[in-house]
Image (cartoon, rainbow, N blue to C red):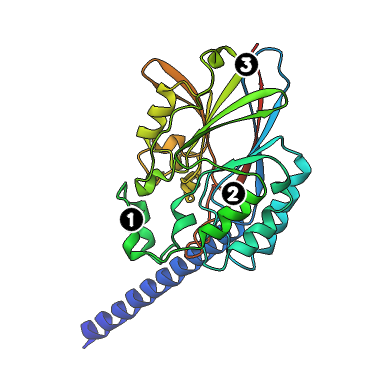
Amino acid sequence: MVEQNNFVSALRHASGTVALAASGALAIGGALVGYGMLEAQKFGLRHETLKVLPRGYGDIKVLHLSDIHMVPGQEAKTQWLRSLADLEPDFVINTGDNLSHRKGVPALIKALEPLMAFPGAFVPGSNCYYAPKLKNPFKYLAPSTVTPSPASRDKLPFEEMHRAFGSAGWINMSNRAHSTVLNGLRLDLSGVDDPHLDLDHFAGWPRGSSSSIQAPHVRIALTHAPYQRVLDQFTEAQADVIFAGHTHGGQVCIPGYGALVSNCDLPTWRARGLTDWDYNGNTVPLNVSAGIGTSRFAPIRFACPPEAVLVTLAARG
């Protein structure tokens, strides 16, 4: 009888220990989620300088926006985006994934309205075309470059968004090449539609006169998702700088280590920031934005706060 009582007592003690551990784990998990939701609102500005302009030309300030993932009612994000106009950029580059809700376009245009007074260019991402879906969050941690099936996704009103961008003078660079003049310098732009949906086609650089290559210019490449095949094409074609987004910087990172995934075949250590991309004897600066928003189904960030990037293009020494 004594042994039975001891056994029952041990069972109760073990059950209490398990329950206590489970409660502790839930509390820690809840705290981490709460912090992750708070960090997703800690919008910041990263500054970079690249010496890629011809000698003798003044600086060009490029504001790089990506992965806004706008949802109606996101007032903090809206006001922060509007405040970026105070930077008075010379040019705005938007590398896609602007929406996370079917009714997000009016909120997005309200947020970007002051910035649309400046010249700009854009390429779309998958979350410009299709709404995000609720997924098992652990699947995100599995390395994969499988393209999502458009047939199973809800379409977003990207045409309305693109019309608003176009009316403001922003250039749609989806599989296009285009030249524009800024501060007396020719900007040669080339962009691709979203590689994550296999929509990319490199159009080369704008064609001009037979001597146009000798005229002062800078070559700027745009892509939403920085897949290696796209970066290789831009680099082999001798771009001066590449702008990309898509990765969210990993979104959930390990302090001291960095991103666990890049959501494409880009090495995770390149998932955020400015690095050099090398291919076939050429080296090109690659700026990957950690993005401004998240999917509305995963509104957290950890050790990876949202960002816009102000890149100052300066003359070569």
Decide: few, some or many residues near mark 1? Use Cα within 10 Å; few <14, some 14-19, many ≥20. few
For the residues marked 3 and 1, what is the alpha-carbon distance in whole angstroms? 41 Å
> Residue 30 at what x, y percent from top left?
51, 67
Q: Residue 120 got which mark?
A: none
Amino acid type, residue under disc 3 in the picture: Pro
- For label 3, the residue is 216
Labels 3 and 1 touching (C-beta < 8 A) = no
- Please tell me in which quadrant of the rendered image residue 135 appears: bottom left
Q: How many marks?
A: 3
Amino acid type, residue under disc 1 in the picture: Pro
Secondary structure at numbered mark 3? loop
Secondary structure at numbered mark 1? loop
Q: Is residue 146 left or right of residue 64?
A: left
Residue under the point 71% across and 53% down: 113
- Residue 93 visible (yes or no): no
- Please tell me in which quadrant of the rendered image residue 293 appears: bottom right
Labels 2 and 1 touching (C-beta < 8 A) = no
> Residue 277 at what x, y percent from top left?
44, 25
> Residue 295 at what x, y percent from top left?
49, 60
Residue under the point 36% across and 18% down: 280
Residue under the point 61% across and 49% down: 166
For the residues marked 3 and 2, what is the alpha-carbon distance in whole angstroms? 35 Å
Q: Residue 148 got which mark?
A: 1
**In front: label 3 or label 2:** 3
- For label 2, the residue is 306
> Residue 52 at what x, y percent from top left?
60, 20
**In front: label 2 or label 1:** 1
Q: Is residue 131 left or right of residue 3?
A: right
Q: Is residue 263 left or right of residue 124?
A: left
For the residues marked 2 and 1, what is the alpha-carbon distance in whole angstroms? 24 Å
**Quadrant housing the N terminus:** bottom left
